[in-house]
């Protein structure tokens, strides 16, 4: 197994914390750059990413989307639509642009 | 998703993953022993030897784009478990009137 922590903690504006596997966070180029390469982080040291410009409801959808993206990339099964509430679409376009994913 | 107060953990699990195995995954992240964890599906305490599918968490009901949700309570210093508490997420702003439409428009972010 390679070095580096397996999970990343993402913090929201309202104090919520989201923990996802590093491999899902790296589906976003911005997260990947923020986390850095595996060799830069000592094992077992927790990785934290500050996303305090965004509220928890946005980040919850971001985490779900990153997992959905990795899960269905190169999938041969039919890919279901990712549900997005209209009320969130503006904020999601903003964060998707920021995260480049 | 495993939720406790303001913490949300996203993990992978199979239909046949047991509750105890899920607690061990949480132990790896939060460094809390499974004996000091209590998992809840809705308000029902989940038993270690049961599988997630026994609580209705299957690959059909809990998908990548729509994950299932499990509550977590940790044991307090006095030996009792804390009450299950999930801090709700924030709410999106109201839709501007110009965007309100009767059609079922879905935006996909590439």
Image: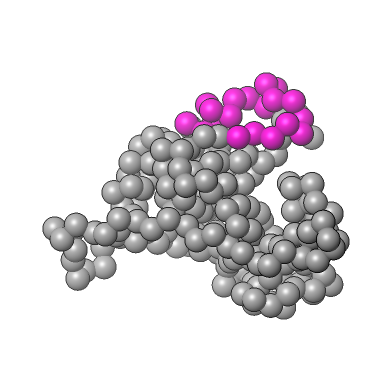
Residue A26 at x, y percent in the picture: 56, 36
Compared with A33, B52 (above or below) is below
Residue at (61%, 41%) from the top-left corner? A9
Q: Nearer the viewer, residue A5 or A12?
A: A12
Report if residue A85 lies within the magenta region. Answer: no
Vertical order, B7 against B19 (above or below)? above
Q: Which of B19 and A80 is in front in this view?
A: B19
Total labels: the figure holds 0
Residue A59: where, in percent of width, then height?
47, 48
Residue B15 picture quarter: bottom right
Which residue lies most toward the top here?
Answer: A40
If the image is split into quadrants, where does the N terminus of chain B sit? bottom right
Q: Residue at x 72, y 64 (%)?
A: B82
**Magenta span contains residue A37:** yes
Drawn side of residue B67 relative to residue A57, left or right? right
Let me know if residue A73 appears in the view.
no
Q: In this view, does B110 lie to the left or right of B11?
A: left
Q: Residue at x 33, y 41 (%)?
A: A94
**Percent x, y for residue A72?**
52, 53
Query: Is residue B19 something one can see in this rendering?
Result: yes
Which image quarter: residue B11?
bottom right
Residue A3 in percent (x, y) is at 75, 29
**Relative side of B77 to B69, left or right:** right
Question: Which range of residues does the magenta coloring cover?
Answer: A30-48
For residue A26, side relative to residue A79 (left or right): right
Q: Which residue is drawn at 76% across and 34% down?
A: A44
């Amino acid at each position: 197994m390679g070095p580096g922590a397996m999970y990343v903690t993402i913090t929201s504006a309202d104090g919520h914390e989201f923990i996802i596997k590093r491999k899902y966070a790296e589906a976003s180029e911005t997260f990947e750059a923020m986390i850095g390469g595996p060799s830069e982080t000592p094992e077992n040291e927790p990785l934290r990413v500050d996303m305090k410009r965004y509220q928890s409801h946005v980040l919850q959808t971001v985490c779900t989307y990153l997992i959905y993206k990795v899960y269905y990339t190169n999938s041969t099964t039919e890919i279901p639509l990712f549900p997005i509430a209209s009320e969130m679409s503006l904020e999601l376009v903003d964060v998707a642009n920021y995260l480049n994913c | 998703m495993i939720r406790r107060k303001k913490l949300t953990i996203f993990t992978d699990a199979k239909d046949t993953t047991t509750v105890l195995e899920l607690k061990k995954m949480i132990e790896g992240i939060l460094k809390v022993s499974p004996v000091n964890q209590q998992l809840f599906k809705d308000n029902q305490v989940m038993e270690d030897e049961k599988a997630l599918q026994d609580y209705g968490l299957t690959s059909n009901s809990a998908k990548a784009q729509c994950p299932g949700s499990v509550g977590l309570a940790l044991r307090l210093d006095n030996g009792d478990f804390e009450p299950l508490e999930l801090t709700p997420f924030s709410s999106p702003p109201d839709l501007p009137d110009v965007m309100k439409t009767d059609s079922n428009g879905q935006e996909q972010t590439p």
